[in-house]
Image: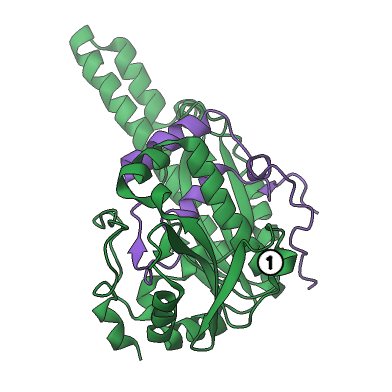
Amino acid sequence: MDTEHLVYLYCVTAQPPELASMGEPPGQLYLVSAAGLCAIVSRVEASQFEPSHLRQNLENLEWLAAETTRHERIVEAVMRKRCVIPFRFGTLFHSDESLQAQLGANGKPLRTLLEDLAGKTEWGVKAYGDVPRLEESIRSQGGPLSDLEEMIRQAAPGRAFFLRKKREDLVKAAVAGRIDQYAGRMVEALQTVSIQMRMNKILPVPTVDRRGAMIFNAAFLVADQDVQTFRNTVHTLSERCADPSIAVECTGPWPPYNFCESSSLGVPPISSTTVPAVNVTKPCADARPKQQVANG
Amino acid sequence: MDDTMATEKDVTLLELLDRVLDKGVVVAGDLVISVADVDLIYVGLRVLLSSVETLERLRGAPLTDGFSEPTP
């Protein structure tokens, strides 16, 4: 077994794509077939994925950007020609044979997933809110808040302090309410023009970014014939919102990363937070997951 | 159409990492490296988000043959 190289898996298709048209250097990519499936792979140096190097590499933004971009570029190139199941960054095999064994063990669920994903792409919708501006607009709305404002003006210093705190809590709650309401409207409208939706965690985008804080992060699986309608709907939502403090971004088409859950393969999901970086020099003979017997 | 709508293929690295690092099939590898150490990733995110880089720029080559819109 070659210990210096590993087989890096990008994606799986039903029919082999023509690799010459992928724009990668000749010989870079190759196909591994098994179980009526075709895996698009390349050989990579094992050293960069070894635990000791990997951590450093992941902290190196240039490496991370270059490698994840390469991963995505290849998956997208295949996606232009074929329906794909995108694999997570850094899915590695010791040999073509061990990959074939995995394809064999997962053949049925992978083929079913490919059928389900045919003619569909993923679209991402994220919204960003300028929270200070949202707070300001709520403060200027009047109502109970301006009553409170009046009370603060007339209160003794000690009591005014607590009233101010109460006012800020009310403002924050009102902002959260407005965001919820907006997110709810987006979900409701976009679900009608998509096949599946996945809500993702809000990423702590730093406020130095011009768009403000992330307030909504979701992915949608959209049928090809509905893409234009989907985009129009996002656009309409964004306009109807008419709140300059909120910006909506729609990106796509993406490979369906969000709709290839391992659970759909009948394999127990691996919790990403608890899986340690596996020692790449470990022999793979016993690493062939037993859980996959349940798939067939 | 909607020129005012953000991005399309003008994709930030954030969008990419949000997918590639912790979405997608995670099953089959002999080794699936753990890149989902949240703190670790956010170290990178903090750096990169100070300037919103586009995927195109990172790729070093424009996506000239982007996806064609399906005709309704």
Three-letter code for the amino acid on which mark 1 is drawn: Val
The picture quadrant where one finds residue A289 is: bottom left
Q: Is residue A101 above or below residue A216?
A: below
Q: Position of residue A10 (x, y in %)?
A: 52, 65
Please, which chain is the residue tagged with disc 1 on? Answer: A
Where residue B18 appears, as percent x and y from the top left, is 47, 51
Asked if residue A48 shows in the view, the reply is yes
> Does the image show residue A130?
no
Residue picked out by circle 1: A227
- When the figure is inspected, residue A55 is found, relative to residue A105, above or below; the finding is above
Residue in front for this viewpoint, A203 or A63: A63
Quadrant of the image containing the N terminus of chain A: bottom left
Chain painted purple: B
Q: Secondary structure at mark 1?
A: helix
- The residue sitting at the left extreme is A158
Rendered hue of chain A is green
- What residue lies at 48% left-to-right and 49% top-to-bottom? B17
Q: Residue at x 27, y 23 (%)?
A: A165
